[in-house]
Amino acid sequence: MNRALPFVFLLALSAPAFGQTVDSQGAKQLSDDLSRYVGKQAIDKGILKVSLEGGAYRILFDFKALAASFPDQKLLKFDFAPYALMVKPRSDGSWDVSMDFSQTASFEFNGPEGLQSTQFSIKDGKGSGVYDPNLAAFTSGTSSMAGMTMASKDAKQRMEASTGAGVATVAATKSATGGVDFTTSQKVSSFVEAINFDDPESGLKFPVTVRSPELSVEASGKGVRTKPLLDLLAFAVANEDEATLKANQAQLKSLLLAALPLWQRIDGTYGFKDFAVESPVGNFGATQLSTVFGTDGVAQNGTITYGIKASGLTVPTQLLPSWSVGLLPTDVDLNFGGANIDLDSMAKKAIEAFDLNKNPPLSAEFGEQLKVDFLAKMPKVVLGHSTVKNKDTEIALEGEMTFPGEKPEGSVTVDVAGFDKLVEGLQEAAKSEPEVGQYVPVALMAKGFGKTLPDGRLEWIVNAKADGSVTVNG
């Protein structure tokens, strides 16, 4: 029961009969259905309560009751108001769901560094949507808040964060490949986070404040196996006892296989506008800063992608030699990840082989063979097309690395536009700062290894073999 995440019971709303009347019998049925996913103890201890209210069911989640159920009580203070969902069956078998998630909460506990405390508040938080139990997903949903604040402190650090108004949406449909396709977006205004590092042992004192007038999150998924994942959750709740879990491991294996590939693809973007970092050494900033992430599910030829993109970069120039300021990048677009990742074979072999009656459930020999089989499929570390540039120069990189015989082997292509401008800048700087002159011969030697492309760019193709040999444009 304690492993169930708050509000995961939302996913368990059972499909109501056509034209179902909201009544006490329906409340009891809903409570019984939810207990499959949060455990009967959650109902018995009052952590989860279902009642009738105004022609709908009220589902109450009591965080204090949950905290009181933990066996190892380190909480010194826990002030957290319950959350309530209002749910009402629709004639098409789905549910109308609404909630007010406004909150003022605080808690204190003894952590590794001593007393730790947190307070947070959400103002005018409201959400509503339509939940389809056949998809185990919200087919539509919106939420909003007027603002949020949070503060925490321990022996070495204090943090305060706040945001202005925020809105979010979610939508889901049945996927043609099985499971659910979803999209979700969120925008929050006036994001501020101030962190004050104050370590009495080392004497380090370093305040940092991060600001952005707009923070946004976008995510999408294809073929997410929501129903099989719910079945796994129900199995975990029903088999918390070790002996029962071992006795039912055949069912567990069947459920794990049914949940594969977990999802077909999930992608997300996290972005800041006019991002700024204020620190004792100066201010850093970017007019736009974003990270992107994408991953296939458990596939035979899966990929993982990750990217960092920043434009309008600024740094405190007093930290740098004056000659280097003109060489600093103003825009960065870095992309990397992996390809040829066969998690499907690994997962299916591991599911078939594990035995909970043995310690360990998978032998070390099996693990080594799994590693050999994985590398035999030639997974790659990929450097996608990436650029670093300023007003005079642009550097582009692209490449990949494999591991034949468990030794790295790879290639990378580097091309530069404006290389002569870079050299001219070094030569000019050397007139007033002679130490810069040592970099000029290095730059000219690098140019000598390069290949001039038709558009004037210089290109270097670097190949590194598993035997340690390296060639450039060879």
Image (cartoon, rainbow, N blue to C red):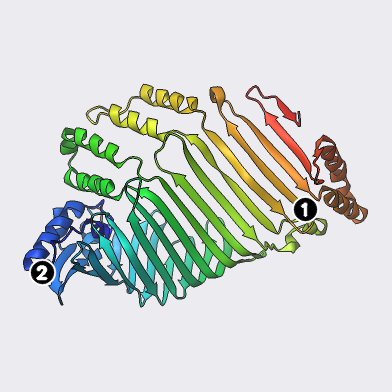
Question: Residue beneath label 2, please?
Answer: 21
Residue 250 image offset from top left, x and y in percent: 20, 32
- Type of amino acid at the residue the image marks with label 2: Thr
**Residue displayed at 27% across by 62% down:** 131
Q: Residues within 10 Å of mark 2 (few under 14, many from 20)?
A: some
Question: Residue beneath label 1, please?
Answer: 393
* Residue 406 visible in the picture: yes
Residue 46 image offset from top left, x and y in percent: 15, 63
Residue that extends furthest to the right in the rendered view of this protein: 431
**Residue displayed at 44% across by 72% down:** 166
**Residue displayed at 34% across by 28% down:** 349
Report whether 377 appears left or right of 446: left
Residue 239 image offset from top left, x and y in percent: 18, 42
- Type of amino acid at the residue the image marks with label 1: Thr
Secondary-structure class at tag 1: loop
Report whether 287 appears left or right of 393: left
Foreground mark, 1 or 2, reads: 2
Report whether 398 appears left or right of 34: right
164 in relation to 238, above or below:
below
Secondary-structure class at tag 2: loop
Residue that extends furthest to the left in the rendered view of this protein: 25
Badge 1 or badge 2: first in the primary sequence: 2
